[in-house]
Image (cartoon, rainbow, N blue to C red):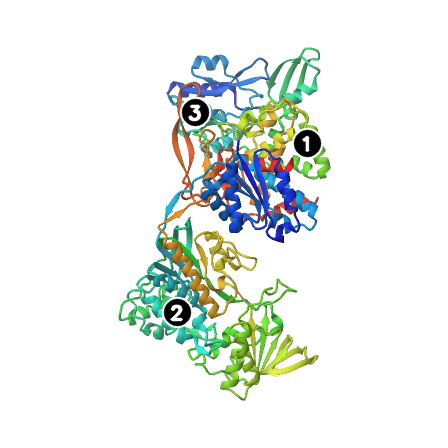
Amino acid sequence: MQRIGVFVCWCGSNIAATVDVKAVAEALKSEPGVVFSTDYQYMCSQAGQDLIKEAIKEHKLTGLVICSCSPRMHENTFRKVAADSGINPYMVEIANIREQCSWVHKDKAIGTEKAIILARAAVAKVHLNTPLTPGESEVTKRALVIGGGIAGIQTALDIADAGYKVDIVETKPTIGGKMAQLDKTFPTLDCAACILTPKMVEVAQNENVRIFSYSEVTEVGGFVGNFTVKIKKKARYVKEDVCTGCGLCTEKCPMKKVPNDFNLGMNNKGAIYIPFAQAVPKVATIDPNYCNMLKNGKCGLCAKVCTAGAIDYTQKDEIIEEKYGAIVAATGYNPISLDKFDEFAYNQSKDVITSLEFERLTNAAGPTNGVLLRPSDLKHPKTIVFVQCVGSRCSADASKGKEYCSKICCMYTAKHAMLTRDKYPDTDVYVFYIDVRTPGKNFDEFYRRAVEEYGVHYIKGMVGKVIPEGDKLIVQGSDLLDNKQLKIEADLVVLAAAIEPDKSARNLATMLTASMDTNDFFTEAHPKLRPVESPTAGIFLSGTCQGPKDIPETVSQAGAAASKVIGLLAKDKLKGNPCVAHSDELMCNGCSSCERVCPYKAITYVDKEFRMPDRTTKVRRVAFVNEAVCQGCGACTVACPSGAMDLKGFKSKQIMAEVDAICK
Amino acid sequence: MQTVTRNQLVEKAKELLNNGTVTRVLGIKKGEFSYDLTPAVFTSAEELEKEFEFNGFAAANFSKYLVKLADGEGKILVFLKPCDSYSFNQLLTEHRFNRENVYAVGIECDGFADYKKIEEEFNDGIKSVEFNGEKIEVTTLYDGKKELAFADYMLERCKNCKTKKIAAFDELLTENSDETKNTRFEEVEKLEAMTPDERYAFWRNELSRCIRCNACRDVCPACTCEKCVFNNPDSGVENKAIQNSFEENMFHIIRAFHVAGRCTDCGECSRVCPQHIPLHLLNRKFIKDINSFYGEYQAGAEVGNRAPLVNYTKEDIEPKDAVGRGSEE
């Protein structure tokens, strides 16, 4: 018989306000096996922990029930208390009387009754608990960063700096991401290329970093410390190690009509191309959808002009398999499609553009060499209207846009407006906004400068419609402060499109078994206390894949993710979770159901000799669980038709005992 | 009426015994009464001649017996009807016997008679039942001799035969046909059309007759656990005395869940039920749901396939859609 101690926490008033903690402690005294029961204001505090330790000693406790907050919060704290007092940490059960009780009830009588029931269930479970010991596993001292934008680059650099190997996988032919497409960066207005490209070179030259550009992650197996990842290196039809990046092929390619995605389709490139002059790696890539040689075997010009002999039309996709200890998701963002925002005439007029397109139009390396010319007739626009929150903060019609604030638009629009007025003082600039949000160091000062020094017309209100008329765009909007309707004849309209996670993120999250929110942003393990870790062990988050962020925030989060990875890789061994699956060989049929549902490939089968009742022996196929690989998800226990598979620490019997105690 | 005759089977069995292909034959022998046929193992031509029987009552699914009988010296011969062949494949998928140890001869099937239905026609005292072409000749103590049309007295599972295709065999004794029928879900649709209250009343009534003899479980080819939970004192739900509580009725529902996705719809559970409970309809409802949620699926159509319930694809139905479906009623 267990000697169980029950410890009811007040959590200040969090629990005590809606649960009569003294009544709970009193009621639990009469439960079988309970030899001690008490309450305390903050059980997790040092004094609370000492109280538990004292009680363990004094009452020779063998099992503990802590009635407190969610086990996600303090289970480890109390397991450690048990371990320090010589009790196996898995003899501790948490009855969650905060999140699942006091916080959801208002009536104290109901809250108290439920808390008693939850505590009884925990007592019933402790009776069937057995001591468990975790296994250990090795840590592969190499990290994988998925995404080669500023987030991925910074994370990789910081990990490499600590002396660990790190690989970057980037789907595009070059690293650099969105930042490489930007012109200047707020609030300091230094040029994006000037601060990014040195980092791109640095990461390429770092001997601890490997870059897999034009590659994708296709399969992820294993677990924290021991991931096995398959990376598909897409055929670029150019030998990466031979190409010198001279660019001769890109000039000679007769196919000139390939939309240049780096300039968002605002100009064209060849079928063989280098995305931009500072690309890393600076090697050419052939687009198989446009190359005549690859499509119908006619041309071959690039191979003829290449003095290095780097062109290889027969190149095939290549799969690389590598082991990693930690994985960082840094998949970034994209502006949303504006197809659903027909009122702004984005698909009707070439002169209605997104902010990212505006960024390319003002970039010295962009399609107009940095001269602000409107796309339709290449004339200087004299009146420009910026529309903010296009698709952001769309609570009324979430199917059209996003409910969240994209966070960066207020600042980059202020930047665009300011730079336009600075370079072309004869231009009238209007900004339609819902609110101007400028939290951040030197952000509000920056916005004030746009208004006060540069004379940008900020109008509180939304644009209702943009009508192309002749070579003008008629912008109809409302000014809420003056309470009047406005009609502005504009030459150029710039839409601050909401940003959304890259489409590849959802598929990646499935492979990583990392969780996502409804907007497909990766969720963090704890919004305040563990913001750069995914709830899945060994998976970390960097940059906008976790939520909208500007560059300074992205870089600091990238560094934080790197430090978490370094902390993991610095360990030689990882303690596993002892709550793993276990098969009762005498009941196992060897039917393979568990093997089929196991997401970690932790189950194999062995032929084993069994003594039968009639003194004969029989060889039977039975399941064998690799405890180092099993993550204790429990899928096998449900799939097992014979009830042979059970989860240590969560045995069916333990759970049934809890259910029985609740239903009593 | 079966086109395959007893003599055909006996000749085949003798041939395979004599040429050493097999050492044992899994078949049926006569029981106490003419409708009462018992699966048995034959090891010699003499035994076959003397005891082997095959008639309109020989509906038993042989596949499950292989779990116990496949081990041994040499191969065992099994005659597989279409129904049996799906169970055969399903058991192989679950590694329940070694395919190497079995020699399977596929035989076509034209349906079997339902003794319970015949019995209902008469007061007690059926002396013998003979099959003669499309007719069943019944001799009784009180009503004399009577002729019944075979087609009217077929098992429900045969009347709504899902397929005539034999899915597994080493050799075919007869033609293999691709004929399939899609009428079997009509019975389920009738139940689905009921209100939840009506359906509850229907099943409570049917299941109230259960005597917990466990015949359904014992005959079920999907029930091959080394140790059944209902025989396991450790499980807390082992055999109980007969009673008609809701909890007791749950036995059949638990069993239906247990075999869901693995049940081939062979209908043996209902055939052997001494209380005439249409148990196979529970399983068939699961099959119908699986078909509508995950696309047409026949357990045992092939060996080693990943059944929808132990597979995950992105096309799988969202739980909310599966749950919401029931609440419309």
The mark found on residue B70 in the picture is 3
Q: Nearer the viewer, residue B35 or A650?
A: A650
Label 2 belongs to which residue? A271
Label 2 marks a residue whose chain is A
Kindly give the residue lying farthest to the bottom in the view shown: A426
Q: Quadrant of the C terminus of chain A?
A: top right
Instruction: For mark 1, give the secondary structure.
Output: helix
x and y percentages locating residue B129 in the rendered image:
62, 16
Amino acid type, mark 2: Ala
Label 1 belongs to which residue? B203
x and y percentages locating residue A156 in the rendered image:
38, 63
The reply to whether residue B313 is in sight is: yes
In the image, residue B316 sits, relative to residue A420, either above or below, namely above
| Left or right of B33 on screen, residue A646 | left
Measured Cα–Cα span from mark 2 to mark 3: 64 Å
Q: Nearer the viewer, residue A11 or A378?
A: A11
In the image, residue A568 sits, relative to residue B240, either above or below, namely below
